[in-house]
């Protein structure tokens, strides 16, 4: 049925019923309130909506007062990706830490339950997680420690357990990123990843966690662990010629696996689709044509307007029908009803006091999980003294678009423990210089040369002083007779893959400072390959399994010399 025959009110509600936009601020803007009254399916929270749990709870209450059936969704994975704790860093270490925990799936179940209580207390209906991607590509720029592991069995076991924990509190879950984003080397926020693998490999590796979550075995047989599934902006040639989020074959495959709930796209304004479709509006139409039920959009209200107009025009032109949109809306409403029923059965309350208590509980559990997982690999780590003034160098070269920025929670934890610490590069917002080093000094080759000169009394480019200014031959004639500078050197890494810029910078620092210690925030699995291949067997590495607040604090405890629940590399390796 066309919009003309359906009537404007029905068509308007049908189109709104597939849109899931973001928005700016901590109050409900007028355009969003109008859309909610006109049948908007839901909203997605971003960090700028959720500065603290009290504000989040109040905002959710205001939105539900306008439209009780509105779905409030959020990317709150824990670890590197957090919205409710974006400023401070997540209290929960994240999926990689859960996957590496010796407590197995039980710990992931408890973590999901604690996260669910926080989300329910802040009025959130749907978690855009868990991540069910299998990280088979160590150089993956966007998934990494967001995944539970590198094997389908591990991801399925922990992902399903975490999902069950969240759902037990009356919050829905959305497994992502179907059919899988773990084998990619391109970040779909900026480009189109391609997984050119045969379908049998895709089924055995990437699809298995989704298949098991949708049709669990054992006591939960017949009861899907997922309320929704998010499709990825990833091209699988074995499935079809378009990225999964706009590929009908991908949606058909998902339905064949047993998924009956909403199919949600990843954000349509991401680079992967913009390059393909030319506009967010066309991407919205193609996604619905492919079988999507809910379309995620970014913060700019123009994205909502463009998508709404394009969908309305597609109905008028006959590309889409009102009935098709209403079927999608019905799936979303079924999700809302199921979530509300589970929340009533669980007796989960919402409000500021409840949210504050839930956050404290999550923080306590997260600290325990991080303490059991964060460990030291190789080398003999010399604990940093209480009065030390360490130099901290962040060698990470790629922006984490999913996390929203290159998180600085490790630096914050170090400076909180050792106030005299110097951090490189400095905060972009800082002005002037500190300790003679410009805050804007970056880590290009010149900046690295300056740091090397600053960290040693004799460096590769020892004719530069601490600010990069040339100076005379002020170094001792026999520099090897003189001690290195007294400040400890802490280096932060994420992907020091051989041949990468991050690896090259690490090698340069390691050559002149063999006493440095690494805090590694990336995947724990390749640590031996990445660091053990450095000369002399490599440095001591604090394996943090992510860069959330809980991970960072546990890493600092290792730098202080305090061992955690796993006090040896051998024990950690046996737990994998």
Image (tube, rainbow, N blue to C red):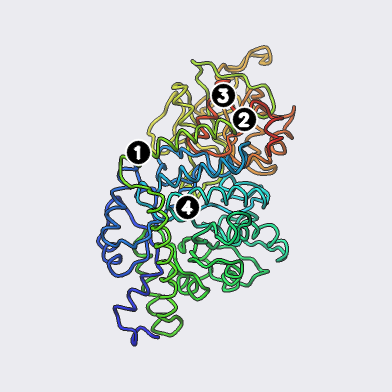
**Residue under the point 42% across and 85% down:** 317
The residue singled out by tag 1 in the image is 356
Q: Earlier in the sequence, mark 2 or mark 3?
A: 2
Q: Is residue 74 left or right of residue 291?
A: left
The residue singled out by tag 3 in the image is 559
> Could you say where residue 217 lies in the image, as x and y percent from the top left?
63, 57
Q: Residues within 10 Å of mark 3 (few under 14, many from 20)?
A: many
CA–CA distance in space, label 4 to label 1: 20 Å
Q: Earlier in the sequence, mark 1 or mark 3?
A: 1
Q: Is residue 236 left or right of residue 231?
A: right
Q: Nearer the viewer, mark 4 or mark 1?
A: 4
CA–CA distance in space, label 4 to label 2: 31 Å
Q: Earlier in the sequence, mark 4 or mark 1?
A: 4
Residue that sits furthest to the top in the current view? 481
The residue singled out by tag 4 in the image is 167
As helix, strand or loop, the secondary structure at mark 1 comes to helix
Q: Earlier in the sequence, mark 4 or mark 3?
A: 4
> Could you say where residue 90 lies in the image, as x and y percent from the top left?
46, 40
The residue lying toward the viewer, choosing from 229 and 523, is 229
Image-quadrant location for residue 41 = bottom left
């Amino acid at each position: 049925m066309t919009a003309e025959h359906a009537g404007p009110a029905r068509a308007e509600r049908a189109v709104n019923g597939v849109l899931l936009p973001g928005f700016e601020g901590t109050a409900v803007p007028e355009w969003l309130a109008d859309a909610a009254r006109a049948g908007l399916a839901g909203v997605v929270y971003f960090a700028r909506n959720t500065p603290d749990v009290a504000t989040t709870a109040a905002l959710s209450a205001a939105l539900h007062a306008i439209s009780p059936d509105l779905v409030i969704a959020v990317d709150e994975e824990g670890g590197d990706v957090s919205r409710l704790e974006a400023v401070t860093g997540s209290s929960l270490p994240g999926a990689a830490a859960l996957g590496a925990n010796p407590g197995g799936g039980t710990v992931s179940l408890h973590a999901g339950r604690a996260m669910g209580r926080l989300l329910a207390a802040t009025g959130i209906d749907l978690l855009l997680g868990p991540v069910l991607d299998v990280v088979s590509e160590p150089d993956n720029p966007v998934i990494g420690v967001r995944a539970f592991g590198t094997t389908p069995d591990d991801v399925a076991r922990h992902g399903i357990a975490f999902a069950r924990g969240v759902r037990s509190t009356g919050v829905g879950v959305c497994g992502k990123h179907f059919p899988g984003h773990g084998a990619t080397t391109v970040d779909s926020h900026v480009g189109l990843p391609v997984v050119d693998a045969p379908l049998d490999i895709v089924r055995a590796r990437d699809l298995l966690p989704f298949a098991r979550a949708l049709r669990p075995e054992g006591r939960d047989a017949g009861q899907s662990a997922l309320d929704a599934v998010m499709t990825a902006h990833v091209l699988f040639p074995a499935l079809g010629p378009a990225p999964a989020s706009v590929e009908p074959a991908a949606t058909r495959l998902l339905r064949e696996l047993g998924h009956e709930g909403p199919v949600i796209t990843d954000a349509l304004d991401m680079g992967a689709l913009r390059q393909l479709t030319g506009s967010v509006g066309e991407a919205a139409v193609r996604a619905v044509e492919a079988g999507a039920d809910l379309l995620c959009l970014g913060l700019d209200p123009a994205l909502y307007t463009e998508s709404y107009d394009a969908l309305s025009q597609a109905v008028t032109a006959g590309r889409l029908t009102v009935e098709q949109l209403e079927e999608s809306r019905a799936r979303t409403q079924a999700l809302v009803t199921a979530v509300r029923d589970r929340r009533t059965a669980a007796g989960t309350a919402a409000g500021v006091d409840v949210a504050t208590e839930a956050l404290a509980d999550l923080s306590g559990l997260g600290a325990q999980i991080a303490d059991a997982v964060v460990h030291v690999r190789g080398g003999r780590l010399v604990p940093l003294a209480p009065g030390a003034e360490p130099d901290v160098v962040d060698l990470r070269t790629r922006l984490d678009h999913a996390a929203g920025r290159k998180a600085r929670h490790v630096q914050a934890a170090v400076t909180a423990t050792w106030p005299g610490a110097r951090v490189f590069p400095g905060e972009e917002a800082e002005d002037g210089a500190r300790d003679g080093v410009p805050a804007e000094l970056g880590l290009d080759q010149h900046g690295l040369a300056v740091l090397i000169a600053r960290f040693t009394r004799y460096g590769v480019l020892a004719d530069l002083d601490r600010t990069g200014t040339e100076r005379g031959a002020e170094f001792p004639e026999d520099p090897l007779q003189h001690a290195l500078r007294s400040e400890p050197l802490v280096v932060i890494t994420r992907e020091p893959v051989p041949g990468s810029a991050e690896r090259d910078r690490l090698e340069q620092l390691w050559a002149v400072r063999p006493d440095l210690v690494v805090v590694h925030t990336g995947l724990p699995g390749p640590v031996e390959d990445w660091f053990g291949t450095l000369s002399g067997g490599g440095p001591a590495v604090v394996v943090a399994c992510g860069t959330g607040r809980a991970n960072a604090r546990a890493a600092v405890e290792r730098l202080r010399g305090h061992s955690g629940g796993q006090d040896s590399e051998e024990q950690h390796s046996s737990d994998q």
